[in-house]
Amino acid sequence: MTLSVPTLNYASYISQTANLIVISSNDPNYQTMLPGMIDYAEQRIYREMDPLREQVTDATTSVSSGIRTVALSTSFGNYITVDQVNILSSNSSTRYPLTFTARPFLDAAFPSGATVTGIPQFYTMTSDTQVSLGPAPDQAYPIEFIGLQRPSPLSSANSSTFLTQYCPELFIAASMVFAFGYMRDFGGRPIIHRAHNLGKISIRRCSPRLRPRLSGPNIRHRLGRHIVHRRRPLHRGPDNADDIGNIAARR
């Protein structure tokens, strides 16, 4: 037996959200709100469910001979962090890992793409969308970027995303938090917030890979299949006047 997993796409997302808001999907006000609603829902989920941001390997870009800089590929989304950069041979059979270095060293050691060329050995970030190499490549090579990406947003040109495929109910709930603000129905927003939070709990229980990493004072305990979060108890002060007197006497 094959199980069918309910998913969304751009068209069904518009239909469902417009139906929940009770407005025509062709209404100009809805069309104006739509990009903001999608952006709010996606950014909130990706921030709160950090492991959903997948590590992506993208080798769709090539470097140019004598040019020290290369733009990060955006074929699958926008890079948040770049963890590794590799130069590939012309047939992609050999990988040459680049070492990250400071920009002052790169500029001092390889000041110009015309004077020192070869297979790049070092790289540094010159902006959030561009990498500098050293030495400058002596010919065109494929370049491979590995890092965390924020996936491309849902749109008419990108009709399916990770969220519409695997977290459709969570995506709808997060969208409705934004929509309730548009409708000025602030009394209903806590209900939608609760539905959104319950959706996150459900996803974490169903898929251990999507459970967020813990930090700070949280302690994780495993009880069977369930995850229980407990906070370390805060330091307690004296409970009554006798305790206070004893402390003063010891001093």
Image: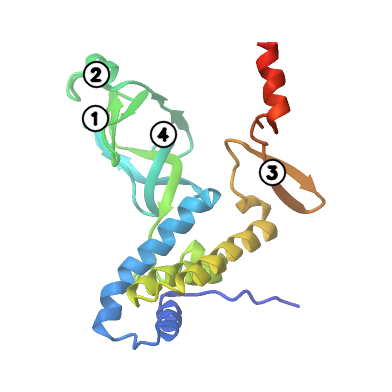
Estimate the spatial distance between the alpha carbons at disc 2 and disc 1, rounded to whole Å: 9 Å
Q: Nearer the viewer, residue 101 or 20?
A: 20
Can you give x and y, in whole percent of width and height, for residue 230 in the image? 69, 43
Estimate the spatial distance between the alpha carbons at disc 3 and disc 4, rounded to whole Å: 39 Å
Can you give x and y, in whole percent of width and height, for residue 86 in the image? 42, 33
Q: Secondary structure at mark 1?
A: loop
Q: Depth-wise, is mark 3 or mark 2 nearer the camera?
A: 3
Q: Which comes before the other along the chain, label 4 or label 2?
A: 4
* Label number found at residue 230: 3
Pointer 3 local density, CA inside 10 Å: few below 14, some 14–19, many at least 20: few
Q: Which comes before the other along the chain, label 3 or label 2?
A: 2
Q: Are marks 3 and 4 in contact (CB under 8 Å)?
A: no
Estimate the spatial distance between the alpha carbons at disc 1 and disc 3, rounded to whole Å: 51 Å
Q: Is residue 226 above or below residue 233?
A: below
Q: Nearer the viewer, residue 251 or 58?
A: 251
Residue 71 visible? The answer is: yes
Task: Please give the residue where the numbered disc 1 appears in the rendered image.
Answer: 68
Residue 120 visible? The answer is: no
Q: Which comes before the other along the chain, label 3 or label 4?
A: 4
Estimate the spatial distance between the alpha carbons at disc 3 and disc 2, rounded to whole Å: 53 Å
Q: Is residue 84 above or below residue 220?
A: above
* Label number found at residue 85: 4
Pointer 4 local density, CA inside 10 Å: few below 14, some 14–19, many at least 20: many
Can you give x and y, in whole percent of width and height, for residue 109 in the image? 26, 14
Left or right placement of residue 31 versus residue 250 in this view:
left
Estimate the spatial distance between the alpha carbons at disc 1 and disc 4, rounded to whole Å: 14 Å
